[in-house]
Image: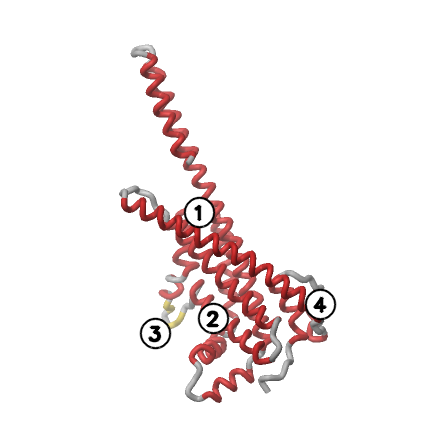
Amino acid sequence: MIFENKYDRYVICLFSKSFGYLRVSHHAIKNCAEMLMTEETKIKLIEGVEQRLDELTSEVERLNETFKKLERTVKFSSENELNISLDGIKNLLEYRLFIGILTLDLCTATLIYLRANFQYERLYSARQILIIISEGYKKIYNFVSENKEGDLVTKYRNNSFWIKEIGHVIKFDLPNYQTQYKLITEQLDKYLEVNFETLKTTRDLSIHYDKEPIKVYNMLSELNIEETFKKMIPFLNILNEMFAFTAELNQGYLNKSENVKKQNNKRIDDIAYSLEKFKDKNDPDIITEFQEKILAFKKMFDK
């Protein structure tokens, strides 16, 4: 029966591991099938997920405003034919925004489960989580397939967010972060152990339904909520690591900008200092005035 509630006993372990708001021992996790969720535990979990939802909502709004400002800067640069490339930071902002939205979706689906009064609400939550995982993974990293000749087809993977946009940032702008990038890539590869074919079937029937509704009913009756949240745990961990990583990359860009500013200031200082040798041969006041005008250019880089 698809309306029988069989899964609350597992939730304390799965959610505490996913969101990190409650701590349980390895022994407790190992024996979570014996544990029941109390009302107090459920309230704490809801509060924890709501807090994460609130924090992420604020961050996503901030990212949206920053992205709008960046677009205006790009437009100004283009209209005035300024040779400024902001593609890397633009791609980084877009990706961080996408990861934020994905995590918000998972938090919301989680709250639906925790607040559910009926088993069908819990099934609906599980279906949404599987859809988010399927579509999110596809946008983030996508898949490598094999053609009839047995050759690997990598065009979808190569066009994914993680490879095309973030990979470009690492390769050309911030190579010092290559090690961290590689570690997260390995986690994405490992996540392929999830049976995406089964997941795709659930996704398709959940989004498109079917002319034979018995297929949808059978999918619902076979849907294992516990396994759904077990799939969510490593995916959510990857998203959390990516979100933290994009913050580090943003700091990397700021540091790089600061270094460029220091280099420009040093060049200006060197040019101004090089004029010292002409003070003996020319009017020193004119040379000093010229030096001051050159040094004034440094203020441009402080804005």
Q: Position of residue 83 (x, y in %)?
A: 30, 42
Which residue is painted at 34% across and 12% down in the image? 284
Instruction: State the residue in front, 150 or 277.
Output: 277
Image quarter (top left, top right, bottom left or bottom right) of the N terminus: bottom right
The mark found on residue 174 in the picture is 1
User: Residue 222: which quarter of the image?
Assistant: bottom right
Query: How far apart are the two marked residues, 4 and 3, measured between alpha carbons?
Result: 58 Å
Decide: few, some or many residues near mark 1? Use Cα within 10 Å; few <14, some 14-19, many ≥20. some
Q: Quadrant of the C terminus?
A: top left
Q: Mark 4–mark 3 contact, CB under 8 Å?
A: no
Rendered image: mark on residue 40: 4
Which residue is labeled 3 in the image? 149
The picture quadrant where one finds residue 212 is bottom left
Residue 135: image location, x then y, percent: 45, 69
Dot 4 or dot 3: first in sequence order is: 4
**Nearer mark to the viewer, of 2 and 4:** 4
Q: CA distance from mark 2 to mark 4?
A: 32 Å
Looking at marks 3 and 1 on the same chain, the residue that comes earlier in the sequence is marked by: 3
Q: Nearer the viewer, mark 4 or mark 1?
A: 4
Please say if the residues under marks 2 and 3 sit with CB atoms less than 8 Å apart: no
The amino acid at mark 4 is Glu
Relative to 152, residue 260 above or below: above
Query: From this viewpoint, is residue 170 visible?
Result: no
Give how far apart the Cα atoms at labels 2 and 3 are.
27 Å
Give the side of residue 225 with respect to residue 64, left or right.
Answer: right
Task: Please give the residue where the numbered disc 2 appears in the rendered image.
Answer: 134
- First-in-chain label (2 vs 3): 2
Eye-nearest disc, 3 or 1: 1
Residue at position x 41%, y 49% from top?
89
Residue 18 visible in the displayed image: yes
Above or below, 208 relative to 248: below
